[in-house]
Amino acid sequence: MPDLLLALDQGTTSSRAIVFTNEGDIVGMGQYEHPQSFPADGWVEHDPEAIWETQMAAVRDAMVHAKASASDIAAVGITNQRETVVLWERATGRPVAPAIVWQDRRTAEHCHQLRARGLEESIQERTGLVVDPYFSATKLVWLLDNVAGARERAERGELAFGTVDSFLLWRLTDGAVHATDVTNASRTMLMDADKCAWDDYLLELFEIPRQLLPEIRPSASTFGHTTPRALGRELPVSAMVGDQQAATFGQACFAAGMVKNTYGTGSFLLMNVGNRRAASRARLLSTVAWQIGDEWPVYALEGSIFATGAAVQWLRDGLGIIASADETEALAASVQDTGGVTFVPAFVGLGAPHWNPNVRGAIFGLTRGTSKAHIARAALEAACLQTVDVLEAMAKDAKRPIRMLRADGGMASNGIMMQMQADLAGVPVQCAGITETTALGAAWLAGLGAGIYESTHDLVPLWKEGRTFEPQMSLEQRGETLDRWKKAVRCLCEEPGG
């Protein structure tokens, strides 16, 4: 019997595929970067065809690396960058425009108008989301209004909308299935988060034709079967889940109160709050964490940070002071502190808990003595300080202190940064034994959807713990650093236009 699980992990900067054993061990991996486009200030686009091609290339490499064939795969799970909008033709599967990426801010004015009309409260009550360009609804409206003939074609039923998971599923099944899962649907600003169904009021508000939308299904369920042309044979797609929910699942945060942070291009903290949605007073998101079959959904509080790894990418690609992201650890370790430098990487605005799309990044405290090592350390510190902002808001909303933070993602392998995080958050930071927890979460959910596992109880002993970092910084030093950060953020937000 086949016993391997294939996870398709389609991210913001690359497409990955990983083959896992049912014990959670990696036996094969493939990864390809795909291009990003920045056609205007605050705009971020992807080519959906490049996403598809790199994803399939990654699958081929992962299978070769695993020395496996399609007949060895028991189930496929898909996890994806969330909120990114794809609009394609039903007849051909061909995209009608570039995908608008979750980071894109072109609809900031539309969101401002919604808030000015007093609609944010009703939208937040239904969706658990704040009104922000981050989410899919206003992006979809922009495509319908700015791509020639798109709205008319959508109303005739000729077009299909989806986040990246839906687009991949459509291609994998050769157009046989147009579906998404509750986690991705919960990020569109179109789904009633309590009913896990498309909301008629919101569809009317945004003037979105219902026939555009995919069917909403549980995260772990049978979505359909791949065609032999796609993966060599018919394979069950047994899970689809947004990447941050997948990472939370892969971190085995199955109990209410557990918190994880994934450090990637952005960073995303999720706290499991159980089977009842928690409203946020601290401007966090109330979102669906996952749903397994017919079970009641699990909900989470989420804080979304737009630029953490993106700041390191900018040091590499924008300033040219490093050749690779790995250099930041040694650079940061070469100085005792940031030398008074504070870096606020608000390249596309600030996410939770500030939700200010208008501010832009800044570096404070530069002197003639500032070196590239100080700036590199400040970039890592910024990732940690933004995380602290969210943790403080999360503790306030949940009315409980944060006892432990589980960490994953590429930056979690940076020991200097993880120690900074423990110091600045004042709690232990427990790194996962493998950094690929996003793909692991998709694989585990696929295993549940395919009946390989009976419940999450089977998965708890499979989670592998990595290094744990304990706080070492004095309370005085921690307070001074947090005050310096809050002053810098306040300065940006209070500027004209901020």
Image (tube, rainbow, N blue to C red):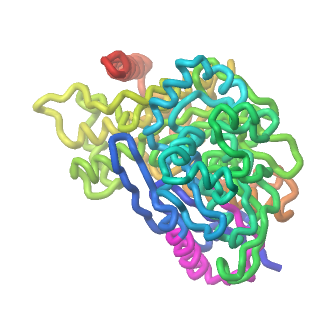
* Residue 347 seen: yes
Location of residue 479 with respect to 167 vertically, above or below: above
Residue at the image point whose x is 79% and y is 51% from the top = 217
Residue 262: in magenta span:
no
* Residue 438 seen: no
* Left or right side of 234 for 394: left
Q: Quadrant of the N terminus?
A: bottom right
- Residue 123 image point, x, y percent: 66, 27
- Residue 200 image point, x, y percent: 76, 35
Tell me the magenta residue range: 53-79
Of residues 384 and 113, the one drawn nearer to the viewer in this rendering:
113
* Left or right side of 7 for 113: left
Circle count = 0
- Residue 179 image point, x, y percent: 73, 56
Residue 60: in magenta span:
yes
Q: Quadrant of the C terminus?
A: top left
* Left or right side of 332 for 399: right
Location of residue 97 with respect to 122 vertically, above or below: below
* Left or right side of 418 for 171: right
Of residues 493 and 201, the one drawn nearer to the viewer in this rendering:
201
- Identify the main secondary structure in magenta: helix
Location of residue 79 with respect to 119 vertically, above or below: below
- Residue 314 image point, x, y percent: 31, 47
Of residues 220 and 400, the one drawn nearer to the viewer in this rendering:
220
Residue at the image point whose x is 44% and y is 34% from the top = 384
Residue at the image point whose x is 72% and y is 60% from the top = 178
